[in-house]
Image: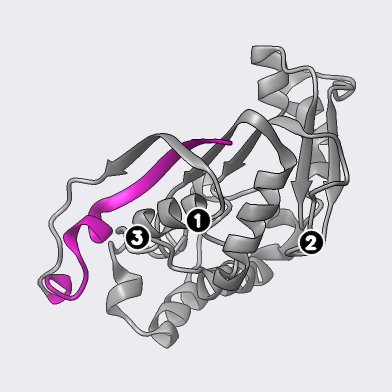
Amino acid sequence: DLALVLRHGATAIHGVDIRREYAKLPRIASEQLGMSRIPAALTFETIEPGASLAGKRPLVDGIMSWSTFEHVQRDQLLPIFRDLNSCLRAGGYFFIQIEPLFYSPFGSHLRRYDDVPWHHLLASEEALWNIIEAHDGPIDAAETDFGFADFGVDGYKKFVFNEYRALNRLTADELVEITKNAGFKLVRQERRSLDMPIPQALRGKYPEEWLLNNEILLLLSK
C-alpha cells in the first residue's frame, strides 16, 4: 500500500485485514525509508474474519489482494467475493494474486523450514511437524515476515504450521470460477508455472497443471 502511494501517486488507499500488521508500518517505513510519518493517503482497519464491508464506505475504484485468498475458508470465499463486488463501482477493477498455490512444489508455505518439493503432498502432517519442530538454525530472510518477532522461534513454528493446516487448497481454475459466480468479469489472467520434475508418486494422483502451477494473477472488473 505504501509503495503504491510513493511510486504511483495513489491518493487514497484503505487497507483491511483481520490482523493488525499494519500497525508496524510506521516503524518499518522509518527504519527502511527514513520516513517520519505515513502519508495521509493511507488508512487501515481491522475486521473480524468474514465481516461484510459493503455499504460502510463509498464505492471504490479498485481492490487489490496479494497472497491472501489461499488462507480464506472455502465456505467464506463466495460470500466475500460477492461482498467485495458490492464495494466496487461499475467499471472498477479487482486484482488478485496467489503464490504459491497449494498443489505446487512449495504450496505448503513451509519452505522456511522444509525445502523438499511437494513434501506436503508426500508426507503426513505428523512428519511435516517433526521436521519443523526439529529445525534449528536461521531462517532465510526472504521466508520470514514482520510477524516473526511477535511469536518467538517456537511460537512462529506453531503459527506457520497452523497456517499450513488451514490452507483452503484452492486451485487456479476454482479461483476463476468462484470470482465469476460472484459477478466479476475476467479481464486478464496469467498463470506462472515451475519447470521441475514431478515425483513418480504424484504422477496420476493430481493433474500436472496443479502440480506445476505456482502462481496466478487475475484482473477482474465489475
Report which residue position mark 1 lands on.
181
In the image, residue 61 above or below residue 218 = above
- Element assignment for label 2: loop
- Element assignment for label 1: helix
Q: Residues within 10 Å of mark 2 (few under 14, many from 20)?
A: few
Quadrant for residue 161, please give it: bottom right
Residue 44 drawn in magenta: no
In this picture the colour scheme is one colour
Residue 32: image location, x then y, percent: 71, 25
Q: Nearer the viewer, mark 3 or mark 1?
A: 1
Out of 159 and 52, give the one closest to the viewer: 52
Q: Amino acid at mark 1?
A: Asn
Out of 24 and 171, give the one closest to the viewer: 171
The magenta segment: 201-222
Report which residue position mark 3 lands on.
115
* Identity of the residue drawn at 59% across and 74% down: 162
